[in-house]
Amino acid sequence: MLSRSALARVSRNAALRSRALSSRASAILSALDIPTNQEVPGVYDGTWGGTGDILESVCPTTGEVLARVQSASPQELQTALDKTREAYEIIRSVPAPRRGELLRQIREALAAKRDELGALVSLEMGKIRTEGIGEVQEFVDIADYAVGLSRMMNGRVVASERPGHSILEIPNPLGVVGVLSAFNFPVAVYGWNLALSLAAGNATIWKPSNTTPLCSVAVTKIIANVLESNGLPGAVAGLVTGGRDVGEAVVESSSVDMVSFTGSENVGRQVGKVVQARFGKVLLELGGNNAAIVMPDADLELAVPAVFFGAVGTAGQRCTSTRRLYLHRSIAPEFLSRLQALYASLRPGDPLESSTLLGPVHSRAAVGIYSSAVNRLRNAGAEILCGGSAFSETDLVGELQGGNFVRPTIAVPKSVDVKDEIWKTETFAPILTVGVFDKLEEAIAWNNGVPQGLSSSLWTRDVRNVGKWIGPAGSDCGIVNVNVGTSGAEIGAAFGGNKSTGWGRESGGDAWKQYVRWSACTVNFSDEAPLAQGVNFTPTA
């Protein structure tokens, strides 16, 4: 006799088989081996399963339910954590260059499905097609990077003051890394973490956003095939989909040595406290209230399009989106005129269409966040130069009427006060707030005056301005660009921010050093055993 839960699953699957999934959605899911006529298993620890709560994946462009995903029950989560720990004990002993070979194979497998995965990102998250493909390319690129890194994760030899001694600083695998990723980069953020973590010899357990479970399932299927074909346990790169309870359990688990969390400042603050309380390691990538500063000598042919992309790209839902724009008084009218002309060219569209530049925000809740922020600006007396409202159904055509589309907005408050809510709070939506300055020092103070410190950008052709901007009295952010927008970082340098952004670093540079445990090892190869600092501890007669 079938259990009540099994009967319910049979009933739900029958309902799924009877529904009509759009051809745009079914073609993408089928290309990535995601079933379209039954519930999708959302737990992987070497085998696929899931008997917990059902997650609905909803297309933000049309409102269509793409799939129902079976999340992790408490027991399945604990089993996955146990298997990840067992997998770590295997992968840590695999030589680092061999782990690099695994990453090369993962890179090749991802590249072979780059366009299909990019389309899924557009379908489930909502970013436009070129950005979805670009996100998958980030995973491909960081895998490339980690292949080489696997042969260069070097320690150091330190000179000893004692004769016949050497000191070694040795990196070793850390353990289990829990990755909690956000909806806005449902593929790349996990890629940054997995590539470095695997190169370092760790096992990873991924808890993705509960609104983008299909992206995580598709990526995990690709990686699992590589691991299994190499005779390694799939739990080296495990997956547990679910809601808040699943995320909290991963964060609280003492078997997870490091937690990498990408999300809001409020949740990140709680994650940091919980992990620190159990003396685990934590990597935080939180809010980004990013500013661009445009000097009177800036090349506007470069600066205007860069600000346009920074503010509107991904419908303003990148961590590095341009949210504040500070213009020198002498060029403010011309700059805003040019920028408004670009905004006027925007039309909402299906992100899967190559001509679309403005896709939806990710959820109905995001539409509400956008509307509330616009209302705050209006109530504060800000001038709304363009945008200022969500698209209504009558503004949209066909299937788009079910989507989450808002008008990108440019607002000019009466003054700049970085302690005011309209300046210091990050709004995850395409809203650009503009201030006018007279001196660079004033603009730098505004840039630095908010709690967040992720990305910043200065537009100038004066080397003196550049020196001030990148120096000790300049931007206090983790990303300090010159004649480059706030958004669109490459993988070669470490990515992350300061202050309430969390101080975490992912991707390139020295970010890999967070995924290992360091040991100082003093080796005595002499026939004496002297103490350091000249200490004499010899008994006297």
Image (spheres, rainbow, N blue to C red):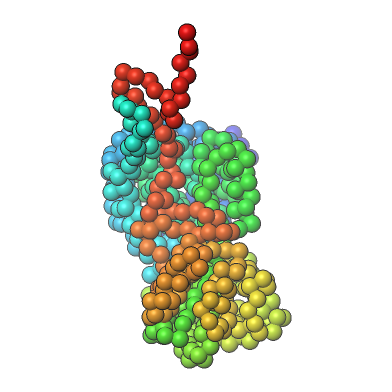
Residue 47 horizontal/vertical position (percent): 44, 38
Total labels: the figure holds 0
Q: Nearer the viewer, residue 44 or 175?
A: 175
Which residue appears at 45% of the width and 64% of the height? 479
Q: Quadrant of residue 302?
A: bottom left
Residue found at the very far top of the displayed protein = 541
Report whether 380 appears left or right of 38.
right
Q: Nearer the viewer, residue 45 or 491?
A: 491
On the question of residue 262 being in view, the answer is no
Q: Quadrant of residue 138?
A: bottom left
Quadrant where the N terminus lies?
A: top right
Report whether 388 appears left or right of 141.
right
Q: Quadrant of residue 32?
A: bottom left
Residue 339 horizontal/vertical position (percent): 48, 86
Residue found at the very far right of the displayed protein = 379
Residue 34 horizontal/vertical position (percent): 43, 53
Which residue appears at 62% of the width and 52% of the height? 269
- Vertical side of 46 occupied by 447: above or below: below
Residue 541 horizontal/vertical position (percent): 47, 8
Which residue appears at 40% of the width and 62% of the height? 135
On the question of residue 493 being in view, the answer is yes
Which residue appears at 57% of the width and 59% of the height? 499
